[in-house]
Amino acid sequence: METKTIKISGDNYHWLVGIAGELQREEGKPVSIDSALTSLRKPQKKTLLDLGDWKDDKEMQKIFDDIVKQRRQYKGRRIATW
């Protein structure tokens, strides 16, 4: 593996070490700074729930119920074409 030396600020270094520490706790084994950077490059799978700032499960359920209700209203309707 080829290695390179880069300059980063102390704040960024400590942030990156924190990321490596979180990965180490999750994986239960030592994690290098390079592994931490690699994990940040991987696309994170997100769901629709990650897009909102939900106050609680009741609010999330209300929004879901509203979506289902609206879909039922429009199901089967034809869309006008020009």
Image (spheres, rainbow, N blue to C red):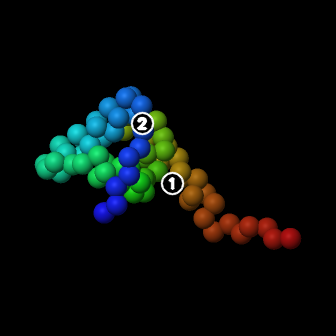
Question: Which percent across, then down, holds residue 9?
Answer: 42, 31
Question: Which percent across, then down, holds residue 47?
Answer: 43, 53
Q: Is residue 69 visible?
A: yes
- Left-right relation of 24 to 66: left
Q: Is residue 45 visible?
A: no
Label 1 crowding class (10 Å Cα cut-off): few <14, some 14-19, many 20+?
few
The mark that comes first in sequence, 1 or 2, is 2
Label 1–label 2 contact, CB within 8 A: no
Looking at the image, is 50 positioned above or below residue 41? above
- Left-right relation of 81 to 42: right
Viewer-side label of 1, 2:
2
| Residue that appears at 31% across and 51% down | 34
- Left-right relation of 19 to 77: left
Question: Which percent across, then down, holds residue 54?
Answer: 43, 36
Q: Quadrant of the C terminus?
A: bottom right
Q: Nearer the viewer, residue 35 or 73?
A: 35
Q: Which residue is mark 2?
A: 8
Q: Secondary structure at mark 2?
A: loop
Q: Nearer the viewer, residue 74 or 28?
A: 28
Q: Quadrant of the N terminus?
A: bottom left
- Left-right relation of 81 to 54: right
Q: Could you tell me the amino acid type at mark 2? A: Ile
Disc ID at residue 68:
1
Q: Secondary structure at mark 1?
A: helix
